[in-house]
Image (spheres, helix red, strand yellow):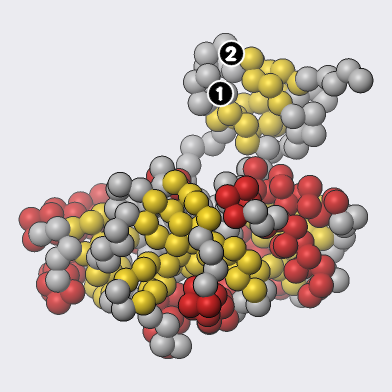
Amino acid sequence: MIGFLHSLIRKDEKLLISAFKEEGLNIELIDTRKLQLTPSMEFSFDIAVERVISTSQGLYTTQFLENQNIVVINSSTVANLCSDKISSSLALNKTNITQPKFGVAFDTTSALSVIEDLGYPVVIKPVVGSWGRLLAKINDIDAAEAILEHKQTLGSYQHSIFYIQEYIEKKGRDIRTFVVGDTCIAAIYRSSNHWITNTARGGKAENCPVSDEIAQISLKTAKTMGGGILAIDLFETPDGLLVNEVNHTMEYKNSIDTTGVNIPAEIVNYIKDKYL
Amino acid sequence: MITQEILVECGVCGASIELETNVELNELVDCLDCTTEYEIIAINPVLIQEAPMECEDWGE
């Protein structure tokens, strides 16, 4: 039996559930919203896959399962690193993986200094967030002062952790790669006239052939994060590829036909081969 | 072979939402007419309610 942690079941989860069933694997669906977690609670499985739409619910539920020595894919170590942009940027830095320059500050004056050092334009992001949500491209000091003040005044404490990246001119597209275990199984270009190219924000996907360079940086990144099932966002620059972000609960429903790769089947095969 | 459809009514616009026969509990479905998102909250019979709003920590 494999535990399947979920909240809302999206097309991605439904495809994965079908893929497990097609391999004859029994899964127990666990809605994290209904759980009443205690350290001693037991589960009827030794392996689980985490597919919860809420990053925090997924992370904490994973920790409770691991407390019972249940293997969760992806692990809480991986989830912690990937879900926190400061943690993942530092991990990438430690292993010399190329990424946009970044800086962090905790008050507006210091944040302005970070921005001035990076040079306009910059991108400010929530430390925890996804789907291109609450990003700001800051083109000048007027915008910087306004956004920093708004974040500090209107947001939770998390929005006073100013994570700032240099803006990378990516000419209308970025690359999303899909890593399962030690293989970069597929990649897509995400194109948009807007500087935010997430498909959640309207970016259009088309197949991206997995070059040696794409595979190499993706696999090194996945290894740095602890491995598992990861989606990696890359920028193309004249000096080579940069890693923008790493995602530990990847979405793929719109990438299966685009790439010709049965991503959920690859995930199930990986779990079967490695853990069962 | 007769395939039985599952139809539910959109509470916002009244359109019929056709569901797959292998619908899952907690599945997210949407009304193609007005794009309102729903969660399947019961099977046999199928019941839907408007899906929860997106939260700040949702995503990949």
x 14%, y 66%: residue: A120
Whichever of callouts 2 and 1 sits on the residue coming sooner in the sequence is 2
Q: From this viewpoint, is residue A6 visible? A: yes
Tell me how many marks there are.
2
On the rendered image, what quadrant is the C terminus of chain A found in? bottom right
Q: Are marks 2 and 1 on the same chain?
A: yes
Q: Residue furthest left?
A: A142
Indicate which disc residue B32 carries.
1
Left or right, residue A233 beside residue A31: left
The quadrant holding residue A226 is: bottom right
On the rendered image, what quadrant is the N terminus of chain A found in? bottom right
Q: Chain of mark 2?
A: B
Residue A20: give x, y in percent of width and height: 81, 54
Q: Indicate the secondary structure of the residue bearing disc 1.
A: loop
Q: Find disc 2 in the rendering and name its residue.
A: B15
Which one is in front, A252 or B9? A252
* 10 Å crowding of disc 1: few (<14), some (14-19), many (20+): few
In space, the residues marked 2 and 1 are separated at their CA atoms by 8 Å
Q: Residue furthest top?
A: B14
Q: From this viewpoint, is residue A155 visible? A: no
Q: Tag 1: residue type?
A: Leu
Q: Indicate the secondary structure of the residue bearing disc 2.
A: loop
Q: Tag 2: residue type?
A: Ala
* 10 Å crowding of disc 2: few (<14), some (14-19), many (20+): some
Asked if marks 2 and 1 touch (Cβ < 8 Å), the reply is: yes
x 18%, y 74%: residue: A118
x 14%, y 71%: residue: A119
Residue B60: give x, y in percent of width and height: 53, 57
Q: Chain of mark 1?
A: B
Rendered position, A231 above or below A182: above
x 65%, y 54%: residue: A260
Which one is in front, A207 or A232? A207
